[in-house]
Image (tube, rainbow, N blue to C red):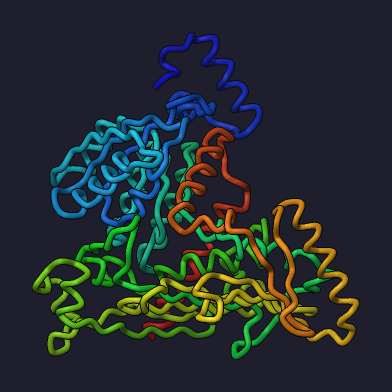
C-alpha cells in the first residue's frame, strides 16, 4: 500500500481529515482501515471465484485509481479460465487495449488463501450466488471492501447474514456495494428526471395490485453474445439452488430501480414493504439447447432433480406484486433461450403519474432499443405540452441534445442522442467509477445501505411468497 511509504505525519494528517470529515472511526478502525485519496494505483482488486462474465466487465477498462495487477482466487475449472480469457481479450483488443496483469491462485482453499494473504483492499465477486453471501461476510470480517455483482443473497434463510455483513462493514469502516448497472441506462435516468417534475408528472399514483403505479418487466436470454462472442454459461447457472430463482436474481435490478425512481434518496425500511403476491414458472431447455449454451453434452448430477424426460426445467421466471410505502409496484422477469435475430434483452417500465405516464418500451416498433414515451390524459393538452417542452428544454442543459417529438395529440417520445446509449457492458465501468469515488469519500450515501437491505428483503420475501 502506498501509504506505507509516506511519513507518519502525513498518515496522521489524512487520518485526522477522514475522522473529522467523511466518517467517524474507532481507534481500531484507524489502525486497520486503509485510506483512499484517489491516488494512482491505490486500489488493489482481488477477484474471488469469478463464475459470471460480470466479473470481467468490471475490468473492461482501466482506472487510474486501480493498480493494474489483479489477484484472482478461485477453484480450478472452466469458470476461472473463462474469466481469464475475457481479460486477455480486453488486453489484446486493437482499440483501447487494457493492461491488466492477473496473478492467479487456484485451489480448493482459494477463499482461505485470499483472506490470509490479503494482497488487495477491494474484493470483486460475480459468480455462484449460493456462495456469494458467505464470500461477502468473510471478506467484510477480514476488513476488505467489497464490490459485488447482484444478487448478494438468494434465499430468505441467508438474508440475516447479509444484514450482518452490512452491520459489520459499518463497524469496520469498509464499503459493501452491489453493482446496479441499470441506474446508468439513459431512458431510466430520464424517466426518473421527468418524474421529479410536478408540473409534468404530478405525483406518483398509489395504484392497485391489478394496475400498479410503477411496473418493471425484463426479458433475458440464456444464449447471447458478450463482447462480440457467444457466451458460454456454466452449468450451475441453470441450478436455481446455486444461481437463484428469477424472483431473486434479475428482479434485484427492477426492485432497485423502483426504489431509486419512486423514492429518490429516501431512506427506506423493511417495514415499508408488503409483499402481496408472487409467482414463479420455468423455462424449458432441451439437451441440444443446454449443450449450445454450456458446451456440455450431458447434464451434471446436480441438475438431475430438475429434469422431466430430458427436458431441463429452470425456475428462472417470476413476478412480485408489492407495496412500497403504500405505493403499488410490480416486478417481473422472463428468461427465454435465445432472442430473435437482431434483438436482445428487453426492458419495459411504466411510472403512472397524476398528470402523465412515463413509459419505456423496447419492442419491434422501437427497433428493440429502449425508447421513453410521455403520455397524458390531461384535458388541457396545450397547457400540458407547454410544461413538457419547457421541462425537456431544462433537462437538455444536463443532457445536451435531447429533443421532444410529438407522436399523437396526447403522446410524445424523447429523442436521445446515441452518445448516451453506451450499452449494458459500459455501465459496469460507470458503477466502478462511482464506487471508487465512494472509497475516496469514505462512505456511501446515507440512504444506500438501508435501501440495499430493503431491496434484498423484498426479493427474498417475494421468493417466500412465490413458494407458498
Q: Which residue is painted at 15% across and 71% down in the image? A: 302
Q: Which residue is painted at 52% across and 36% down in the image? A: 439
Quadrant in which the N terminus is drawn = top left
Report if residue 202 is visible in the image: yes
**Of 180 and 60, the residue lying toward us:** 60
Report if residue 133 is visible in the image: no
From this view, report whether residue 214 is shown above or below residue 228.
Answer: below
Looking at the image, which residue sits at the far front?
A: 94
Please state if 190 lies on the left or on the right of 38 as rendered: right
**Of 269 and 109, the residue lying toward us:** 109
From this view, report whether residue 331 is shown above or below residue 311.
Answer: above
Quadrant in which the C terminus is drawn = bottom left
Q: Which residue is painted at 42% across and 19% down in the image? A: 2
Q: Position of residue 178 (x, y in %)?
A: 46, 53
| Quadrant of residue 151 within the rendered picture | bottom left
Q: Position of residue 467 (x, y in %)?
A: 37, 83
- All told, the count of numbered labels is 0
| Quadrant of residue 143 within the rendered picture | top left
**Of 1 and 55, the residue lying toward us:** 55
Q: Which residue is painted at 54% across and 26% down in the image? A: 37
Q: Position of residue 117 (x, y in %)?
A: 25, 31
Q: Position of residue 209 (x, y in %)?
A: 60, 87
Amino acid at each position: 500500500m502506498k501509504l506505507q511509504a509516506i511519513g507518519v505525519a502525513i498518515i496522521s494528517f489524512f487520518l485526522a481529515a477522514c475522522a473529522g470529515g467523511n466518517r467517524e472511526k474507532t481507534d481500531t478502525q484507524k489502525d486497520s482501515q486503509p485510506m483512499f485519496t484517489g491516488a494512482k494505483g491505490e486500489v488493489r482488486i482481488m477477484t474471488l471465484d469469478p463464475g459470471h462474465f460480470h466479473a470481467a466487465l468490471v475490468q473492461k477498462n482501466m482506472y487510474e485509481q486501480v493498480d493494474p495487477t489483479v489477484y484472482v482466487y478461485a477453484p480450478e475449472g472452466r469458470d476461472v479460465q473463462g474469466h481469464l480469457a475475457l481479460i486477455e481479450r480486453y488486453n489484446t483488443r486493437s482499440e483501447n487495449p487494457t493492461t491488466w496483469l492477473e496473478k492467479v491462485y487456484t485451489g480448493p482453499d482459494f477463499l482461505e488463501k485470499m483472506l490470509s494473504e490479503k494482497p488487495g483492499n477491494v474484493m470483486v465477486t460475480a459468480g455462484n450466488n449460493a456462495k456469494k453471501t458467505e464470500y461477502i461476510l468473510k471478506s467484510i470480517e477480514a476488513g476488505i471492501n467489497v464490490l459485488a455483482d447482484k444478487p448478494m443473497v438468494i434465499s430468505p434463510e441467508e438474508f440475516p447474514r447479509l444484514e450482518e455483513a452490512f452491520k459489520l462493514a459499518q463497524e469496520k469502516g469498509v464499503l459493501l456495494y452491489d453493482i446496479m448497472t441499470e441506474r446508468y441506462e439513459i431512458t431510466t435516468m430520464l424517466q426518473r428526471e421527468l418524474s421529479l417534475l410536478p408540473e409534468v408528472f404530478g405525483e406518483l399514483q398509489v395504484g392497485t395490485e391489478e394496475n400498479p403505479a410503477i411496473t418493471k418487466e425484463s426479458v433475458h436470454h440464456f444464449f447471447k453474445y458478450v463482447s462480440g462472442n457467444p457466451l458460454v454459461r456454466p452449468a450451475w447457472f441453470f441450478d436455481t439452488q446455486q444461481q437463484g430463482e428469477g424472483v431473486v436474481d434479475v428482479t434485484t435490478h427492477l426492485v432497485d430501480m423502483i426504489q431509486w425512481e419512486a423514492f429518490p434518496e429516501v431512506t427506506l425500511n423493511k417495514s415499508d414493504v408488503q409483499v402481496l403476491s408472487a409467482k414463479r414458472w420455468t423455462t424449458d431447455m432441451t439437451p441440444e439447447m443446454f449443450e449450445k449454451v454450456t458446451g456440455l453434452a450431458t447434464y451434471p448430477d446436480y441438475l438431475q432433480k430438475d429434469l422431466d424426460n430430458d427436458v431441463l426445467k429452470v425456475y428462472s421466471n417470476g413476478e412480485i406484486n408489492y407495496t412500497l410505502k403504500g405505493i403499488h409496484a410490480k416486478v417481473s422477469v422472463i428468461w427465454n433461450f435465445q432472442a430473435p435475430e437482431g434483438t436482445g434483452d428487453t426492458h419495459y417500465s411504466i411510472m403512472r403519474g397524476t398528470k402523465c405516464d412515463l413509459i419505456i418500451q423496447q419492442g419491434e416498433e422501437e427497433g428493440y432499443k429502449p425508447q421513453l414515451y410521455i403520455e397524458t390524459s390531461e384535458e388541457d393538452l396545450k397547457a400540458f405540452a407547454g410544461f413538457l417542452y419547457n421541462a425537456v428544454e431544462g433537462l437538455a442543459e444536463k443532457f445536451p441534445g435531447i429533443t421532444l417529438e410529438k407522436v399523437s395529440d396526447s403522446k410524445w417520445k424523447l429523442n436521445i442522442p446515441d452518445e448516451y446509449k453506451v450499452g449494458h457492458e459500459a455501465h459496469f465501468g460507470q458503477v466502478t467509477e462511482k464506487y471508487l469515488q465512494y472509497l475516496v469519500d469514505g462512505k456511501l450515501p446515507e440512504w444506500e445501505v438501508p435501501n440495499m437491505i430493503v431491496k434484498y428483503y423484498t426479493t427474498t420475501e417475494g421468493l417466500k411468497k412465490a413458494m407458498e
